[in-house]
Amino acid sequence: GPVGLAAAASARLLGAAVVIIGDVNPIRLAHAKAQGFEIADLSKDTPLHEQIAALLGEPEVDCAVDAVGFEARGHGHEGAKAEAPATVLNSLMGVVRVAGKIGIPGLYVTEDPGAVDAAAKMGSLSIRFGLGWAKSHSFHTGQTPVMKYNRALMQAIMWDRINIAEIVGVQVISLDDAPRGYGEFDAGVPKKFVIDPHKMFSAA
């Protein structure tokens, strides 16, 4: 989605040699590939660490970002059909190297009435925290401090260091088109819809 694509673009801007995006949606994976990122197809039964090893020659990465959160689904043909709120964090702890970092802008909540079990309804997930502790991982959670990075990112955009609109698939739509945009976004299209009710973009 757009959060993951923006995170990938940021990693590239910061100098990452290889950036891998994982998803179960083939259309979003194709878009990520077209933007120059490597991909891990999580709809396949091939484990994540094996897909990483096929790309990098080793089954681990320096750092990772969970841009999904508690609404994640499992891996593989069967796993992708069911909600698995802890799967992203557990998978990342498995593939991030010792002393690596895991950023978690993906949303996790204190209550989820529609969760798969009683524990998850209270925001309590089956996370392999012992693995993260043993590997000395650093976890960074919560909302991104946007204003901290605002000026540097704006300069990068203005001086063509990063084309974030193309990477996240920005499409400007009218207020009348908003229901269609929400429907397409919910279906998983690789787009970031920007609603422009006053036609400010067309006037700029």
Image: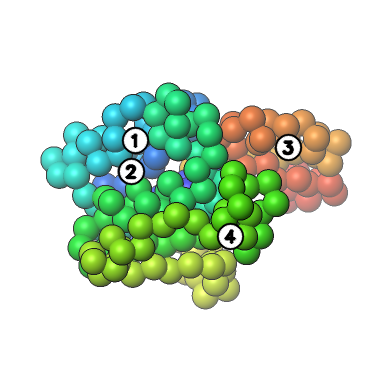
> Which of the two labelled residues, at mark 1 and mark 4, occupies the earlier sequence position?
1
> Which of the two labelled residues, at mark 2 and mark 1, occupies the earlier sequence position?
2
- Is residue 177 visible to the viewer in this orientation of the structure? yes
Where residue 2 is drawn, which disc sits there?
Answer: none
| Amino acid of disc 2 | Ile
| Amino acid of disc 3 | Tyr
Closer to the eye: label 2 or 4: 4
Where residue 182 is drawn, which disc sits there?
Answer: 3
Whole-percent x, y for residue 133 in the image: 29, 68
> Which of the two labelled residues, at mark 2 and mark 4, occupies the earlier sequence position?
2
Whole-percent x, y for residue 180 in the image: 77, 31
Whole-percent x, y for residue 127 in the image: 41, 57
- Answer with left or right where residue 68 lies relative to residue 53: right
Between the C-alphas of marks 1 and 4, the distance is 28 Å
Closer to the eye: label 3 or 4: 4
| Amino acid of disc 1 | Ala
Q: Nearer the viewer, residue 179 or 15?
A: 179
Look at the numbered discs 1 and 4 and tell me whether their residues touch, using CB distance below 8 Å. no
Residue at numbered disc 2: 20
| Amino acid of disc 4 | Gly
Residue at numbered disc 4: 123
Looking at the image, is 158 positioned above or below residue 145?
A: above
Look at the numbered discs 2 and 1 and tell me whether their residues touch, using CB distance below 8 Å. yes
Check disc 1 and report its element: helix, strand or loop.
strand
> Which of the two labelled residues, at mark 3 and mark 4, occupies the earlier sequence position?
4
Check disc 2 and report its element: helix, strand or loop.
strand
Crowding at mark 1 (Cα within 10 Å: few <14, some 14-19, many 20+)? many
Residue at numbered disc 1: 40
